[in-house]
Image: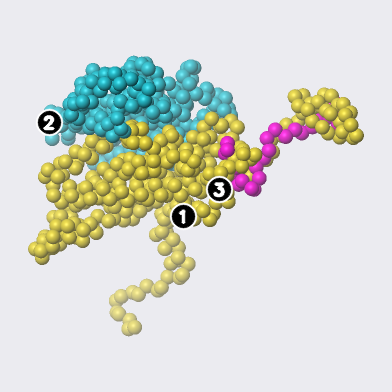
């Protein structure tokens, strides 16, 4: 290429610098949260193949087994009495226990096993019915994933349709839908859920409907705002002139314009749905047992904190990490796709 | 401003009616409402009497009228599990819930507001990072789990505080912290971003240029304006505390309305549950209304629009 006079051509940057620059641009990519979310997704989908044990059937002899890293809990006790009972065996009395042990003498200190430690058979221990915590947590991911998926499709679907209609038609339609949104936002979700569940019974379908009712208003409100802007655009007017029907305009011309907002809203709602579902499960109003929902697993361990802290701790940590990752990821996505939506916080 | 307040007031009334309608529809959707009180062993006379009392022989809209009339005079039927009027049980438990809610609210303001200001003023400092972590955990950890973990640490392991109940003076500490935690996080984040906005504004720069001391700028000029979003959120906070109390009271066996609602759910006690839900919604709506009024009072942009 001929040299252009007066123009300084920059030498190509060395490779390490280019990589460093690219890394700098991607510096806010939330790698750890994304990794957690991928693990969540994969375990949820592949639960039957990954889980080492049956999540709903326990081994009653292996109740309250601690996680593998917890060692045997032992205590030193003093031999206060030793009686010869037979060939080579001596009945000894400790401060508050009896054991048989060869060659024990009064005054010896002996290590007594209080609770057995964990083993690699149950990596995260077992619950009060001897069910494997790891398998239950893995299946819990599956339940959460299904609930989130169905709720987002139903709730998001209703919200988007309502938002499109309200924004497009305005007037009475808009007023009615927006007042419905206001009313929904003024009723505490959990209370509404309790009433519906007590009246209609506890089932997966009811839970999903309750959660969908809980999330649609936010979709409707934000999508409506977008539509109000979009419908004044020239391409909409041109489509009308070209004779496109209203449904066609809404679906092919307006909807693509709100997809970004929809994606952002959906990611931001995932955490909320998981928290709500687990809260309902914890209160005994969620997906019916013995299905291993995280919230009801935490509830299982409620009265056993002193004996088996892991029953409540493990599923709670799972919820926290997933929700946290989802929130961080959602914030990042919002900044990347549409900085205007920062006010959504 | 009057129009604004009138609108808000009407909205509150409409909300209450919507809730009453939902409760009414659900009580009928669940099947014959007489089954709540009677079973197959009751006499025909009992069934007839109840039909008359509940107005079940009348059309639905008249039944709803009867329901509303009873609700307005505080009659929600007898609790099935306790055999007493539901309202009576609720009034006994109301103080405990209000006490817990107030304690949690104070906790969230006392901790959240100063942390929010300091993390905005000293951006990127140690406090800012602590605040960020607090906020992240507060918005991601489920309340019920947080409560159990606090209970495990401070009541079971360290034995500093009572694990549950309301017998001792210190009993309220753990439930209040659990309930308030989320709102500490929320207040902190809101105030931080509001303060950052305000500190960047022209009038703060002007105040600084005129030589007003740094402290006076922060506390007098900036904070007053940054508090507006926090106040708006306070309305949602107070309402959310209602929902939160359901969970926290269950975890810590705090004898309030939240625990009562969950008990009613587990005991399939519909008359009691509907009464609790109405009272909760009423509290929620009143709080929201109060905040709207306060908001209009503080922010002139609303007062004059």
Which residue is located at x 29 percent, y 30 percent?
B32
Circle 1 residue: A45
Count of marks placed on residues:
3
Q: Nearer the viewer, mark 2 or mark 3?
A: 3
**Separation of residues labelled 2 and 3 (CA atoms):** 62 Å
**Separation of residues labelled 1 and 2 (CA atoms):** 53 Å
Could you say which quadrant of the image residue B141 lies in? top left
The reply to whether the magenta stretch includes residue A124 is: yes
Circle 3 residue: A54
Task: Characterize the magenta stretch by its predominant secondary structure.
Answer: loop
Of the numbered discs in the image, which one, if any, rests on residue B3?
2
Looking at the image, residue B119 sits to the left or right of residue B201; the answer is right
Chain B tint as drawn: cyan
Direction front: furthest residue: B44
Which of the image's four quarters has the C terminus of chain B?
top left
Chain A tint as drawn: yellow
Q: Is residue A206 above or below residue B59?
A: below
């Amino acid at each position: 290429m001929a040299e252009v006079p007066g123009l300084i051509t920059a030498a190509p940057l060395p490779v390490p610098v280019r990589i460093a620059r690219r890394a700098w641009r991607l510096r806010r990519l939330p790698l750890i949260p994304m990794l957690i979310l991928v693990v969540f997704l994969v375990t949820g989908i592949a639960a039957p193949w990954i889980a080492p044990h049956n999540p709903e059937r326990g081994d009653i002899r292996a109740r309250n087994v601690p996680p593998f890293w917890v060692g045997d809990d032992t205590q030193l006790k003093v031999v206060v009495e030793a009686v010869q009972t037979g060939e080579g065996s001596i009945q000894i009395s400790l401060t508050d226990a009896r054991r048989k042990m060869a060659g024990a003498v009064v005054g010896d200190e002996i290590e007594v096993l209080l609770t057995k430690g964990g083993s690699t058979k149950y990596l995260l221990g077992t619950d009060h019915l001897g069910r494997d915590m790891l398998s239950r947590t893995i299946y819990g991911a599956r339940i959460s994933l299904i609930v989130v998926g169905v709720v987002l499709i139903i709730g998001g679907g209703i919200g988007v349709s309502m938002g499109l209609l309200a924004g497009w038609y305005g007037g009475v339609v808009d007023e009615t839908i927006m007042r419905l949104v206001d009313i929904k936002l003024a009723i505490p979700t959990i209370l509404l859920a309790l009433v519906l569940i007590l009246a209609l019974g506890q089932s997966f379908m009811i839970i999903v409907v309750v959660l969908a009712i809980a999330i649609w208003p936010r979709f409707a409100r934000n999508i409506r705002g977008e539509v109000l802007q979009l419908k004044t655009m020239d391409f909409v007017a041109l489509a009308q002139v070209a004779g496109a029907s209203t449904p066609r305009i809404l679906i092919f011309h307006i909807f693509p314009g709100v997809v970004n907002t929809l994606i952002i809203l959906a990611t931001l709602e995932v955490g909320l749905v998981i928290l709500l579902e687990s809260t309902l499960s914890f209160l005994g109003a969620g997906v019916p047992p013995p299905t291993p929902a995280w919230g009801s697993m935490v509830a299982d361990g409620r009265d056993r904190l002193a004996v088996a802290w892991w029953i409540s701790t493990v599923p709670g940590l799972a919820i926290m990490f997933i929700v946290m990752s989802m929130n961080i990821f959602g914030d990042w996505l919002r900044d990347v796709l549409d900085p205007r939506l920062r006010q959504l916080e | 401003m009057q129009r604004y307040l009138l609108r808000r007031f009407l909205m509150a009334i409409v909300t209450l009616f919507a809730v009453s309608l939902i409760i009414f529809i659900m009580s009928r959707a669940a099947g014959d409402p007489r089954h709540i009180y009677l079973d197959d062993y009751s006499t025909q006379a009992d069934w007839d009497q109840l039909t008359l009392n509940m107005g079940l022989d009348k059309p639905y809209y008249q039944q709803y009228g009867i329901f509303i009339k009873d609700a307005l005079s505080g009659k929600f039927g007898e609790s099935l599990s306790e055999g007493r009027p539901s309202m009576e049980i609720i009034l006994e438990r109301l103080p405990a819930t209000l006490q817990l809610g107030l304690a949690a609210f104070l906790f969230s303001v006392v901790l959240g507001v100063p942390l929010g200001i300091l993390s905005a003023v000293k951006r990127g400092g140690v406090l800012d990072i602590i605040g960020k972590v607090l906020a992240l955990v507060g918005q991601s950890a489920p309340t019920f789990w947080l409560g159990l973990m606090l209970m495990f640490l401070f009541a079971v392991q360290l034995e500093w505080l009572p694990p549950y109940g309301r017998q001792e003076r210190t009993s309220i500490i753990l439930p209040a912290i659990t309930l308030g935690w989320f709102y500490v996080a929320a207040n902190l984040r809101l105030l931080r971003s509001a303060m950052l906005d305000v500190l960047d504004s022209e009038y703060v720069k002007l105040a600084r240029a005129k030589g007003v001391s740094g402290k006076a700028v922060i506390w007098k000029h900036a904070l007053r304006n940054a508090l507006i979003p926090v106040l708006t959120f306070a309305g949602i906070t107070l309402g959310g505390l209602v929902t939160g109390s359901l969970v926290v009271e269950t975890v810590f066996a705090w004898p309030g309305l939240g625990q009562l609602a969950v008990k009613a759910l587990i005991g399939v006690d519909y008359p009691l549950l509907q009464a609790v839900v109405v009272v909760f919604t009423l509290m929620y709506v009143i709080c929201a209304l109060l905040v709207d009024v306060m908001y209009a009072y503080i922010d002139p942009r609303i007062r004059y629009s």
